[in-house]
Image (tube, grey):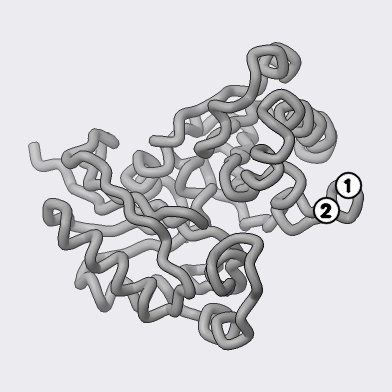
Amino acid sequence: MHRVTTLSIDCGGGGIKASVLDDAGTMRAHPIRVPTPYPLTTDLFVQTLVDLAASLPAAERVTVGLPGMIRHGVVVTTPHYVTRSGPRSRVLPELVEQWEGFDAQTALQTALGLPTRVLNDAEVHGAGVVSGVGLELVLTLGTGLGCAIYDGGRLAPHLELSQAPVRWGLSYDTYIGEHERRRLGNAMWSRRVAKVVGGLRPVFLWDRLYLGGGNSRNITATVLGWLGDDVVIVPNSAALVGGARIWRLTVD
């Protein structure tokens, strides 16, 4: 039986990862990663992904996860890619102009010559782990905070929770992002994660919360014990697996 193959690309603030998977989510190639180049024009972004694709086996379709608010494959805003040298560096107005309203899905579909879906990176990550039962919230812990909501396996409209204020005038991105984890150490940072989970619980009343992203593995055992049975830690590999699975879910 033929299995459709998907080129799955996970675009982060520090690196861009890619692999080719079959429609069961099994990797057909070892994942490759390149540092995210800065300053990142939209042309350089497209070329970087084309170069990644050329280093992997041929695929029949493409899924790309991007940080920020993505609607119908179009970038509304992206926090990291408009900066001079990456997260927490100076925002360049000329990059803001390029990225806001950039139809990434059409640009990549044209460049790669394959059916392409571009979504928020946490939404793709979530597709790799959700069960399809009840309301499932996905939070990814990495450079900043990613968020996705699935209801009965159906992807809900995206909320850019990362930019909301949480404490001391800090956004979620800043409060529990990678910079603060390095500054505080894993123990104190994990306590912050627990506070965030506790604060969001009455807002979403989820049936299950998935904590993913590269930093989920840094949550201490003590804090894991506090989080509750409705909170599940998931591997960062879901960001690529979700690229194949999301084609079976109801999305635009």
The quadrant where residue 230 appears:
top right
| Residue nearer the viewer, 13 or 110 | 13
For label 2, the crowd category at 10 Å Cα-Cα, with few meaning under 14, some 14 to 19 and many 20 or more, is few
Estimate the x, y position of residue 238 in percent, counting from the top left: 42, 36
- Horizontally, is 42 left or right of 94 in the view? left
Mark sitting on residue 167: 1
In the image, which disc is placed on residue 249?
A: none
Q: Residues within 10 Å of mark 1 (few under 14, many from 20)?
A: few
Secondary element at tag 2:
strand
Q: Nearer the viewer, residue 164 or 173?
A: 173
Give the quadrant of the N terminus.
top left
Q: Of all residues shown, which one is farthest toward the front?
A: 183
* Residue on which disc 2 sits: 170
Rendered image quadrant of residue 215:
top right
Q: Give the alpha-carbon distance from disc 1 to disc 2, as whole Å.
A: 5 Å
- Seen as rendered, the residue at the extreme right is 168
Residue visible at 22% across and 70% down in the picture: 112
Q: Amino acid at mark 2?
A: Leu
Give percent across and percent down for residue 27: 23, 37
Q: Position of residue 50 (x, y in %)?
A: 25, 68
The reply to whether the C-beta atoms of the residues labelled 1 and 2 are less than 8 Å apart is: yes
Which residue appears at 26% of the width and 43% of the height? Answer: 31
Residue at x 55% of width, y 64% of height = 86
Residue 177 screen position, x and y as percent: 66, 46
Q: Amino acid at mark 1?
A: Arg
Q: Is residue 234 above or below residue 174?
A: above
Q: Is residue 205 visible?
A: no
Q: Using residue 32 as the reference point, say whether residue 57 is left or right of it.
A: left
Q: Is residue 12 left or right of residue 3?
A: right
Say which element carries label 1: strand
- Is residue 24 in sight in this rendering? yes
